[in-house]
Amino acid sequence: MPSGEYDPDAVEPRWQRRWVDEETYAYPDDDPVDPNTVFSIDTPPPTVSGSLHMGHLYGFTLQDFVARFERMNGGATFFPFGYDDNGIASERLTEDELDIRHQDFERREFQAKCREVCAQYEEQFTENVQSLGVSVDWDHTYQTIEPRVQRVSQLSFLDLYDQGREYREKAPAIWCPECETAISQVETEDDEQASHFNDIAFPVVGSDGADDDPEEFVISTTRPELLPACVAVFVHPDDDENRHLVGESAEVPLFGHEVPIIADERVDMETGSGIVMCCTFGDQNDIEWYQVHDLDLRVAIDESGHMTEVAEEYEGLHADEAGEAIVEDLEEAGALLDRRDITHTVNVHERCGTSVEFLVTEQWYIEMLDKTDEYLEIGREMEWSPEKMFSRYEHWVEGLQWDWLISRQRSSGIPFPVWYCEDCGEVVVAEKADLPVDPLSDDPPVDACPECGHGEFEPENDVLDTWATSSLTPLINAGWDWDEEAEEFTMEHPELYRFDLRPQGHDIISFWLFHTLVKCYEHTGEVPFEETMINGHVLDENREKMSKSVGNVVEPEAVLEEFPVDATRYWAAGTAVGDDFPFKEKDLRAGEKLIRKLWNASKLVESLAPEPYPDEPDDEELRELDRWLLAELDSQIERLTELFEDRAFSKARDELRSFFWNTFCDDYLEIAKQREDDAAAYTLRTAHRRFLKLFAPLLAHVTEELWHDMYADAASDPETDAAVSDGPRDSVHLVDWPAPLGIEADRDAGAAATAVVGTLRKYKSENQLPLNAELDAVEVYADVRGFEDDITGVMHVADLTVHPDEDAPVETVVTGIDLDYATVGPKYGDQVGDIEAALAQGEYEIDGDELHVAGVTLVAEEFEIEEERQYQGDGELLEADDVVVIVRSEA
C-alpha cells in the first residue's frame, strides 16, 4: 500500500534502473512477431556534438508517449536508440574538445580521437535518456559509424550506383571555407548580415565618352573580393538605358582583363544599378550563367577562403581582408563611386555559420532533380502529424536547385567503397560481400583496370555525407543486407518495415526526412513510414529561441534537479505536436500537483477498498452512481484512445486530468467515503486500475510505483483474467490498454446527481456545517431519478423532493445596464446624462438586441445587461450548472 508522501527522488531512479536491468521494453527478437501487430518507431539518432538540451528532453518524451501507448494498445513495440557520430558535427566536437584540427593528423589517427571523444558523450547521452524514463530497448542501439552501419551505408552507395542514380562530376559545388569541405544545399541556411553596396565604375572597352574618356557604367556589388573572378557582365534585354552595351566588352577595374557584356532575362533590374557582374562563382545565378553562356573559369578563392593567384597582388589574403584592400585601392584609383551600408541575406553553413563559397571541385552526387514530382507524391503517401507540416516538405522539394552532393572532404566519416584507375580514371567499386571497406587501407577487388588493363589504382579519399548514412535508419534497424547466395537484398526483421512512425523535429524535414524518403524509396520501392510526427521547438518564456549567446537557455539538468521527471513529462504533453512553445515553470508545478493528487487519491482508494480485490458484483448490486461512473469512464477511455492515436497529447493530458480530478476525486470519491459496500469497493478499484493505465504513458514512474504496490501481486487482472504476478505484468506499461466495459447508465442523470452533491457539499462548507449534518428538506429541479439514495445518503438529506419535468420557480431579473461609453459617448454626447438618469429610474425597454431609453435606441454592442436569478419562495436557492437546488430548514 502506498504510504507517506510520494518521493520521486527515490522512486524514479529505482524504476529507471529496474526497467533497464530487467529489459522491460525489449523487443522479442527470438519469438515470431506478427507484422500486423508490431509497432515500429524509427527514432532519430541525436547528433553527438554536445550535451542534452531541452529540445532533446521534449522530443524524447513525445516519442515515449507513443511507444508506451502503442505497447499497451497493440503488442510488440520496436523502440531503438542510435547515436549519430559520423560526420562534421562529431569531427568539430573532437577538434573543440582536444583543441586540434583534423588536417594536422593522418585520417585513421584522427578518427580514433573522434571515437574516444564521442564514446564519452554517448555514455552521457545514454545516462541522460535513461534518466528521463524513456522506454527504449537498449538491446537495439547503434552508432552511425559502427562497422554494421558502415556496411549498410556502403551497400546503399553501391545499389544506387548500379541503378545509375549516382555520378561523379567536376562542377561548381557549395563549399564551406571554415570546414574545408563541400556541403549540400540542405546544410545551408540564410543569415541576415551587415554589409556594403559598393558602386564600382567599369569602363567600356573601345568607347569614347566626354573628354575622350571611355564610356563607363556602374556595378553595385557586396563582394568586391570577387572582382578578379569576373568573367562577364549582364544586362537585362528590357533595360532601355543600358541595353546598348550588349555586345561590347568591359574592363575589370584594378585587374584589367576584358569581359563580354551579355543580355540575360535573369538580371534583376531593381537591385543595385541593374547591371550585374558574373564571377565564377558568387552565387547560383553565376553558376547558371557560366553553364548557359559557356564562360571562362576564374577561381579567385581557394578551399580555405583565401585568395588564389588569379587575385594577383591580393593572393594569400583571406577573402574578407582582400575585399577591404580592393575597396581601398578602388577608391584610390577613382573607380569607387559610392559605398553604403546595407543588411542582406547571406547563405551560410548551418554547422559553423561561415558564409559559403561556390568552388569547382570533383564530387559525388545522387541524382534527384529528375524525380522531384515523384518525391512529392511519395511524401503525400505518409500520414503527417500535424498535417500542416507537409507544406514544409513540399516547399523544400519544389525549391530544390541541386542534386544531392554526398561527398565530403573530411577525416571522420564512412569511406566511399571506390578506387580509380591511375591511368584512365575508370571507377572501380567494392564487391558487396567485402563491405565495409576503406580504400585507403584495403585493396580494390580487381588486379587490373577492367577498362584499360592498368594495374595501379588511386583510392577515393573523400567520405560520405553523414546524412547519406542517417537517411538509412529504417533499413539499419530492419537489418537490411545483401544475400550473396540469393543475390538479393533481404531484411532480418521484415516485420518492422514499413516503419509505423518517424518522429522528429520540424527543423530537419529537409535534412533527415526528405533524404530518408529518397534513399529508402530508391532501395525498396516503397515509402519507409506509415506516419511522421513532427515536433516543434522549446522557446524561452518570451517565445524567443533559446541561445547560449543570448543567455536564455534552460538547462535540462537544472530542471530535473528541481522537478520530478514525471512533472517534465506532464510539461512535454502540454502543447500541440508541431507547435513551438515557451518553457514555463508553472506547467511543471501543475505536473507536481497532479502527481501528488494521484498518489493521495490512491492511498484513499486503498483505505476505502482494501485487499483482497472485490469480486464483480451482480448487475443489480451496482448502484446507479457506480454504473454512471464506470459508463463515464468508458466514454473517457474511447476519447483518450482516439486522442493518443491522433498524437493529440495535450488534449489527452488535460481531459484525463480534468476527469480524474473533478469527476472521480471531487465527486465519486467524496460520495464513496460515506459507503461501506462491495459495489463501491469494486467501482473504486476498477476505476483506479484503469486510471493508472490511462496515466501510464504520461506519468511513467508514479503509475509504475502505484501499480507495483497495489496490483502487481494480484492473482489476475479482473478486466482480462490474465495473470499479473508472473513476469512482465509486474509493470503497468506491459498490461493491456483499457477497453470500455460496456456498462450502460443514465449519464445525464448521473451528471446532474453529482452536481447536486457537489453543490450541497459546498453549501455545508460555506455555512460551516459538518458534512454529516442533516439537511431537513431539499428540492431538486432536474432528472436525478435512480440517484436519490446516493444524494440522501451522502449528504444526509431527511426529505428529498425531485422535480424531473418541472421548471424551477426561479426568474431572471435585470439588475442593471452597463453602457459602453467608448461608443455611446461620442455618438450621443450631451444625451448621455439623460440616458443614465432614465436607466437609474428603470425607464427603459429591452427589445431583443435593442435598448430603448431616453428617446434613443442603443444597439447590442453599445450596452450590456446585468442579470440575476432570483427565488421568491421559502428556503435558499443553490445552482450548479443547469441544476436548481432549494434547501429549506424546518426550524
Image (cartoon, rainbow, N blue to C red):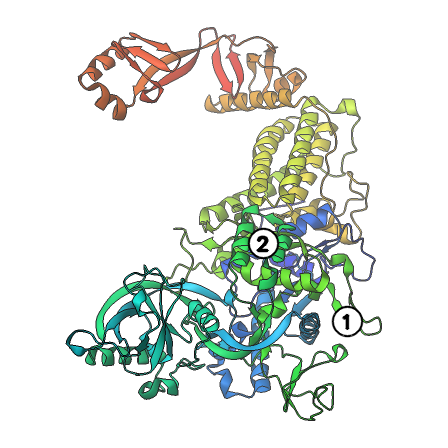
Front disc: 1 or 2? 1
- Image quadrant in which the N terminus is located: top right
In the displayed structure, does residue 573 sit left or right of residue 746? left
Whether residue 676 is visible to the viewer of this picture, yes or no, is yes
Q: Position of residue 314 (x, y in %)?
A: 32, 85
Q: Neighbour class for label 2 at 10 Å: few (<14), some, many (≥20)?
A: many
**Residue lying at the far left of the rendered structure:** 211
- For the residue pair 667 and 658, the one nearer the viewer reads as 658
In the displayed structure, does residue 822 sit left or right of residue 268? left
Q: Secondary structure at mark 2?
A: helix
User: Residue type at mark 2?
Assistant: Thr
Quadrant of the rendered image containing residue 260: bottom left
The residue under the point 41% across, 72% down is 354
Q: Neighbour class for label 1 at 10 Å: few (<14), some, many (≥20)?
A: some
User: Residue type at mark 1?
Assistant: Trp
Above or below residue 66? Residue 215 is below
Which disc, if any, is residue 28? none
Q: Earlier in the sequence, mark 1 or mark 2?
A: 2
- For the residue pair 122 and 706, the one nearer the viewer reads as 122
In the displayed structure, does residue 113 sit left or right of residue 554? right
The residue that disc 1 covers is: 482
Q: Position of residue 729 (x, y in %)?
A: 76, 50
Above or below residue 498? Residue 246 is below
- For the residue pair 524 and 473, the one nearer the viewer reads as 524
Q: Secondary structure at mark 1?
A: strand
Q: Position of residue 325 (x, y in %)?
A: 27, 81
The residue under the point 67% across, 48% down is 69
Using the numbered discs, state the Cα–Cα distance from disc 1 to disc 2 in whole angstroms.
35 Å
Which disc, if any, is residue 61? 2
The residue under the point 44% across, 58% down is 554
Q: Position of residue 398 (x, y in %)?
A: 53, 56
Whether residue 11 is visible to the viewer of this picture, yes or no, is no
